[in-house]
Amino acid sequence: MEMIPDQLRQGIEESVARAGAQVIDLVIRGEKGTRVVEVFVDSEAGVSSDLCSTISKEVSAVLDKSDFVRGAYRLDVSSPGIERPLRFPWQYRKHVGRTLQVKSRAGGAAGTNAGVLLAVEADGIVIQAGKKDPARRILFADMLEARVKAQW
């Protein structure tokens, strides 16, 4: 993976925002002529194939103007899936009732915690490891990473 210039990242993020979504992750890999550009997007309304198509056209125009991605490239636009960390508070609301793995750095929940997401508050979340365990509140400001834990 390569470092993506700020100007290119900003152009892609603005294109995605115009389509009503947000960039969750952006990856450019490969060599000139065989590059793969992966744009993972999400929105409060979810991600449809129509949304991905719209974003693909917008981002393609940005990439075609860029000096960073020259020659042939493959552009993949998709939803982030559960393997990608949650980045925005609104994403958590979509996962209430699911199990999260949360790494945090401060407070009573420091370290790594797994639990069912019970609630999303303005400044954090509430998770519960087991039905008999007390619920824990973790502030967004203290979170290092949070992922939905697969249930298989």
Image (cartoon, rainbow, N blue to C red):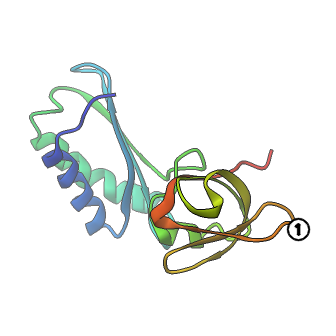
Front residue of this view, candidates 35 and 114 = 114
Q: Is residue 67 above or below residue 78?
A: above
Q: Position of residue 40 (x, y in %)?
A: 42, 49
Q: Secondary structure at mark 1?
A: loop
Q: Position of residue 120 (x, y in %)?
A: 59, 76
Front residue of this view, candidates 58 and 117 = 117
Q: Say which residue appears at 14% left-offset and 33% top-offset.
A: 68
Q: Say which residue appears at 57% left-offset and 49% top-offset.
A: 81
Q: Is residue 42 above or below residue 151?
A: below
Among all residues in the image, which is located at the extreme right?
132
Task: Check the picture and name the quadrant holding the C terminus.
Answer: top right
Q: Quadrant of residue 106?
A: bottom right
Task: Check the picture and name the quadrant holding the N terminus.
Answer: top left
Residue located beneath label 1 in the image = 131
What amino acid is labelled 1 in the image?
Answer: Lys
Q: Position of residue 115 (x, y in %)?
A: 74, 59
How packed is label 1: few (under 14 Cα within 10 Å), some, or many (20 or more)? Answer: few
Q: Position of residue 11 (x, y in %)?
A: 17, 53
Q: Quadrant of residue 30?
A: top left
Q: Is residue 1 above or below residue 12?
A: above
